[in-house]
Amino acid sequence: MKVKIRKGDLIEVISGRDKNKRGEVIKVVADDHSVVVSGVNIRKKHQKQTQMGGRTMAPGVIEFEAPIHISNVMLVCPSCNKPNRVTIQRLEDKVVRVCKHCGSAIDS
């Protein structure tokens, strides 16, 4: 399956607990069809004190962004500022993503 969302894209969550939240993609996990988005799907983890490479990691509760399935997010078009579906078109020697609503190229 071709993943049409890339690192650094602005996305909007369309379903789930964090519906209508927007954020930037930090990481794309293509094998699991999921993305990690800043400020979305925040989880808490109780961390034990551990030693790694001579350093001691402090114990306590840490917060981190968990992955969210790619079907629950939509790419936000920079020109129309709405979450839209994306198509891929070949223009000369480039492959660009194009907004289905307004028809503008997302990749510059």
Image (tube, rainbow, N blue to C red):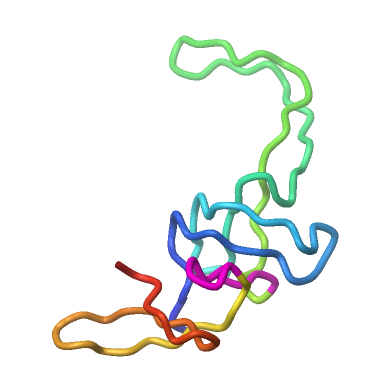
Q: For this view, does 21 lie left or right of residue 54? A: right
Q: Is residue 74 magenta?
A: yes
| Picture coordinates of residue 65, whole percent (x, y) | 66, 45
Q: For this view, does 66 lie left or right of residue 24? A: right
Note whether 35 is above or below 80 in the view shown: above
Q: Residue at x 73, y 21 (%)?
A: 48
Q: Residue at x 56, y 83 (%)?
A: 85
Q: Residue at x 50, y 62 (%)?
A: 29
| Picture coordinates of residue 11, whole percent (x, y) | 59, 63
Of 31 and 83, the residue lying toward us: 83
Q: Is residue 28 magenta?
A: no
Q: Which residues are magenta?
A: 72-81
Q: Residue at x 59, y 54 (%)?
A: 36
Note whether 71 is above or below 69 in the view shown: below
Q: State the residue lying farthest toward the right.
A: 17
Q: How many numbered circles does the render carry?
A: 0
| Picture coordinates of residue 64, whole percent (x, y) | 68, 38
Q: State the residue lying farthest toward the left.
A: 93
Residue 49 lies in quadrant? top right
- Image quarter hosting the C terminus: bottom left
| Picture coordinates of residue 81, whole percent (x, y) | 58, 67
Q: For this view, does 16 lie left or right of residue 28? A: right
Of 48 and 44, the residue lying toward us: 44
